[in-house]
Image: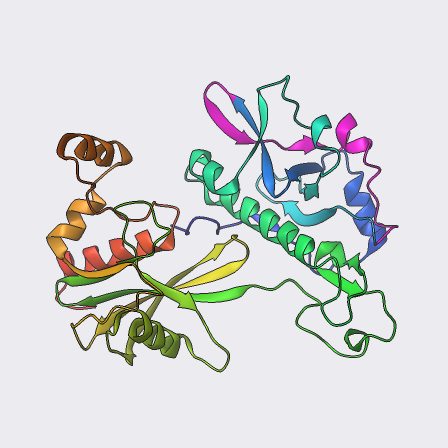
Amino acid sequence: MAEWFSGSAIDRCGNLRGNNVWMNEQLTHALAKFLPFFNLEVLCVKTDEQTQLGWISANASAVQNMNLSVEDPLGVRFVFLGLDMRTGHNEPLFALDVTGFEDTFASSADPTYSWRNVRDVVMSLGEEPERSAILSQARSMLDWHHRHRFCPGCGSRTAWGDGGYKLKCTNAACVSQSSVQNYTYPRTDPVVIACIYKGDKLLLGRQKRFPPGMYSCIAGFMEPGESIEEAVTREAKEETGIVVLPSRVRYHSSQPWPFPSSIMIGCLAEAESEEILLDAKELEDAKWFTLAQVQESASLSPKNIKTIAQTTGDIPMWLPPRMAIARSLIQAWIKSRLNQPSL
């Protein structure tokens, strides 16, 4: 099964979206749909106690009033997501920044529609990966646009292009006009996250910002000139003092993480040492947990955790939610320990 925020079923049409004539046709297509965002919060609609993404059709008055077009590259407020291949109708999908028009899409007088934080809403969408994948793509792209309205090379305004996947500096003398620069296109920051084990023990840590009781895998941003294996080794040593040899690191899976735009590279890694030397600047705590302890934590639901806390006064150790790749890595380790002697 695909990780949350992955498994998209849309065609991004990278070979077509740079054609403005074609793009305008998609904007006015009878089946075109727009996913509105306001301050990077997504429009949601609640019906029968279920939360759904608030897609708006191209012919809706709220969309029509925005006069969307690619003719003004400084004023474009949308990103082309792709053609929806799930229905067979190839519906054009767009992410739309409605800042300044937000009241025409969701009003306090109508509680059916509301702006929701993407982190909060994603768990209510169900385990259909394509829905969270489209949401991930939309939020990451709009966040990139928010952060790159001005060229980081010279400070001039940037202009929309390629369906929203390129921002070009408007200063003809800028260095970005004569060479490929890493700020011209959307960036994705690689992060390694490792399930580090030794025999039937698993190393988990917690940051200060984590909810009480939650422990997760060791993670950190990759640095230039580093392989995935080397990054895992470095992060383990820096944060916990645990020695991991690059040769004992194995890739498991990856996950887009739209906060703001990372790619989580999930690994399983066997430790050489056991003594923890905690870096208090990185982690609040790190511990070795037995297989039995991890299994028990994996079985706890949010309701179970709340009940235990109310009954005993103590919050039990619990694992990241299903939307996080850390949970998949931990589940893979549990399965390996139950079914085979080593990874």
The residue sitting at 45% across, 72% down in the picture is 222
- Which x, y percent locates residue 123? 42, 38
Horizontally, is 195 left or right of 162 in the view? left
Query: How far from the left and from the top, in percent, is residue 110?
Result: 62, 18
Q: Is residue 210 magenta?
A: no
Residues rendered magenta in the picture: 47-73
Q: Is residue 64 magenta?
A: yes
The quadrant of the picture occupied by the C terminus is bottom left
Q: Is residue 29 visible?
A: yes
Q: Quadrant of residue 13?
A: bottom right
Left or right relative to 129: residue 75: right
Q: Which one is nearer the viewer's eye here, 119 or 341? A: 119
Residue 223, percent from left and from top: 47, 76
Residue 311, by quadrant, is top left
Q: Quadrant of residue 241?
A: bottom left
> In the rendered view, would you say 146 is above or below 127?
below
Residue at image coords 64%, 17%? 109
Q: Nearer the viewer, residue 126 or 200?
A: 200
Q: Position of residue 140 (x, y in %)?
A: 59, 52
- The answer to whether residue 17 is visible is no
Residue 248 shown left or right of residue 30 in the figure: left
Q: Tell me which residue sits at (23%, 59%) in the image.
A: 333
Q: Is residue 87 left or right of residue 79?
A: left
Q: How is the image coloured?
A: rainbow
